[in-house]
Image: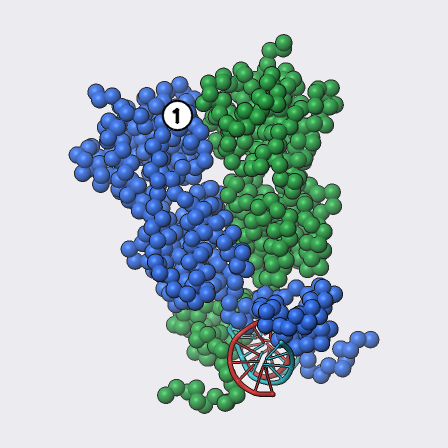
Chain colours: A blue, B green, C red, D cyan
Amino acid sequence: MTSDETLPAKRRSRGTGRVLIEDVARIANVSTQTVSRFFRAPSLVAEATGNVIREAVVATGYVPNLIAGSLASNRSQVVAILVPTIANPVHAAPVEGLATVLRSHGYQVLLGSTGYDAETEQDLIATFLGRRVDGLIITGISVLPAARRMIEAAGIPVVQIWELPDDPIDMAVGFSNFETGVQIAEHLAERGYRRTVVIAHAAVVDTRSAARVAGFKAASARLGLREAPVIKVDRTTSVQGFDILDRLFDVDSRLDSIFAVSDQVAIGVLLACQSRGIRLPETLGIVGFGDIEIAAQLTPTLTTVRINRYRLGELAGEMLLRRFQGLEVSEPVVDIGFDFVVRDSTPNRQMR
Amino acid sequence: MTSDETLPAKRRSRGTGRVLIEDVARIANVSTQTVSRFFRAPSLVAEATGNVIREAVVATGYVPNLIAGSLASNRSQVVAILVPTIANPVHAAPVEGLATVLRSHGYQVLLGSTGYDAETEQDLIATFLGRRVDGLIITGISVLPAARRMIEAAGIPVVQIWELPDDPIDMAVGFSNFETGVQIAEHLAERGYRRTVVIAHAAVVDTRSAARVAGFKAASARLGLREAPVIKVDRTTSVQGFDILDRLFDVDSRLDSIFAVSDQVAIGVLLACQSRGIRLPETLGIVGFGDIEIAAQLTPTLTTVRINRYRLGELAGEMLLRRFQGLEVSEPVVDIGFDFVVRDSTPNRQMR
DNA sequence: TTGAAAGCGCTAACAA
DNA sequence: TTGTTAGCGCTTTCAA
């Protein structure tokens, strides 16, 4: 017979049968508050007391319920990150950087894949706010107005990554995608290419790749070059060269170069050329974006733009952590820049 | 002057100033319980009542606090997944599959990167259990005993992925890594290769790649072939061919083929050969593992093993969902199999 | 179909 | 350095 019968009749316990902080407290002969303190700030507990508590924790196998702690403290120790798709290593890298930085400070990462869909993004934001995440990382700037209002109402720190928003929700870490397009156009022009075809991303919310194309076009116009034809692909995250190669020559049978908004697409074209016996780089100059690992090992090696993607996530995490500590973030919008990496896929082209 | 002064003096509210369920209830002129029901099971609320509540929700901008809900209901609606590193697309794919399946059922994904470290894995498991996740997905079988005990004590459903454990913690979705190694050895033998060098993973917790190597060795021995030399690399997730190529020829200057435990490594070697003008596939047969997207587009195309990685995560999610619904999982350990994909990198070799 | 009361397990505020 | 008390905001239980 248990002691349950000694409880007031009205008490209908829904207990989960797990070890609670009060069990530890009773065994260690201290208050629950002291046990709580022992976990959150051990330095505030006398060493002898701490040892007794530690023993009681081991003896009982106590695991603190962080949900209860979150409710009481109004801090969840969770940060959410929204990416278009985690299956693209370009977006996986910041997640890895973020998770690593946060974990060393006791925070965990809640992951949301939007599939390049603004509605899905908004739904995820709503859910994450309902979970009372302490901070939010968002890929890009195309946040729906309603979602933005929800975020602002929640008042939590937010970092937008991959772009430099004119009107940031809060903080941002990124670089000028437009400028990468400009440099690519200038490079191709300087090397003697005159008939570039651009391979862009069909997804409208991918404002990052759109900005690269816009930069390319603006610079081409300024240089007095023809307006490059653009073909659009549904997915820029996969290597799918043969179809694209056909479409390229359909659009301009005399093209001399391509600029693809992602390395994956550029590499697809490069490999398709190889497979069909089209000589590279003589026949076609190729520029990609992202500098994925394989870009430097292909033959020819790929001219592209390198971003420190891991650092992007790491830095975003560090900015959130500063805010969590109540500190100022001196530079709320950080330009981490990019490296334009010239390799063998865009050699000097003899003028015609 | 606010109404605060009418509150009992002892009441020291720590309220967050946000809209609460009771605000909605007051405005809609119903009890908090009815509002709660409206969110969890709208069909139990009269339509007219529901409409009034909906209006009140919109008017106030109420966002339910899921933390409080989790504490009260003892369900967090969160599933955690542990992967060695999210930066490897091979491990990112199941995460994407899991997240997609779970999201459509109102569950979110908490992500943990272990960095192929068992201690880190254990720490993450402890944290996730403290957060009272409703389910857990673990990559592989090398869970430390203490971590295993914690999981079993928590009594939540668990799915181990990528392997078929002899002694599963709970459920599993995987395939026989050993058997992939066997088929690779048989294929190379049948095609006339006699001097294979194996490129393995140095990380001891990567029991998956170890099993592939073991299968390869067992089959080679059974076929009466020489025991293949093994070289170990620290990271199998990156394309790093030149160093490895040198080491290969150091180990066996007359090797005729390689088996790499990951496509990334196999492709690194393939590209390094290309770059150095080593003729493929004549000089060297190459087999990888994983069938990453680019494998089919290289020249020569890569012989490898295909796993439905996305499905791996999806299926694991579906198994958890069944358990959450209190249903039986008829087959707790599922073998999803693999496809051995023979391509151009391992042509028939003329006997010497 | 709706409501009242009593927790869920922890931490913040205050006091000693 | 430690303890007491009163919540955190929701859902469960039970009753109507």
Position of residue B106 measured from the top left corner of the image (x, y, whole percent): 53, 58
Rendered position, B14 above or below A55: below
Residue at 72% over, 67% down: A55
Question: Please, is residue B81 above or below residue B308 in the view?
Answer: below
How packed mark 1 is, by other alpha carbons closer than 10 Å (few <14, some 14-19, many 20 or more), is many
- Relative depth, front residue between A235 and B85: B85
Q: Does residue B14 appear to the left or right of A64 in the view shown?
A: left
Q: Residue B228, located in which quarter of the rendered image?
A: top right
Residue A282 quadrant: top left
Residue drawn where x is 49% and y is 18% of the image: B278
**Residue A240 shows in the view:** no
Residue shown at the point (39%, 43%) measured from the top left: A307
Task: Look at 45% across and 77% down and name the residue there.
Answer: B23
Closer to the camera, B48 or D2? D2
| x, y percent for residue B213 | 66, 31
Closer to the camera, A347 or B308?
A347
Percent position (x, y) of residue B87? 50, 43
Query: Is residue B212 shown above or below A158?
Result: above
Q: Residue furthest top?
A: B352
Seen from this angle, which residue lies furthest front?
A47
* Amino acid at circle 1: Pro
Q: Is residue B301 left or right of residue A279?
A: right
Residue located farthest toward the right when viewing the structure as drawn: A1
Q: Identify the residue under disc 1.
A: A300
Q: Position of residue A343 (x, y in %)?
A: 36, 30
Q: Secondary structure at mark 1?
A: loop
Q: Is residue B131 toward the left or the right of residue A3 in the image?
A: left
- Number of marks: 1
| Quadrant in the picture for the N terminus of chain B | bottom left
Which chain is disc 1 placed on? Answer: A
Q: Quadrant of the C terminus of chain B?
A: top right
Task: Name above or below for residue B55 compared with residue A121.
Answer: below
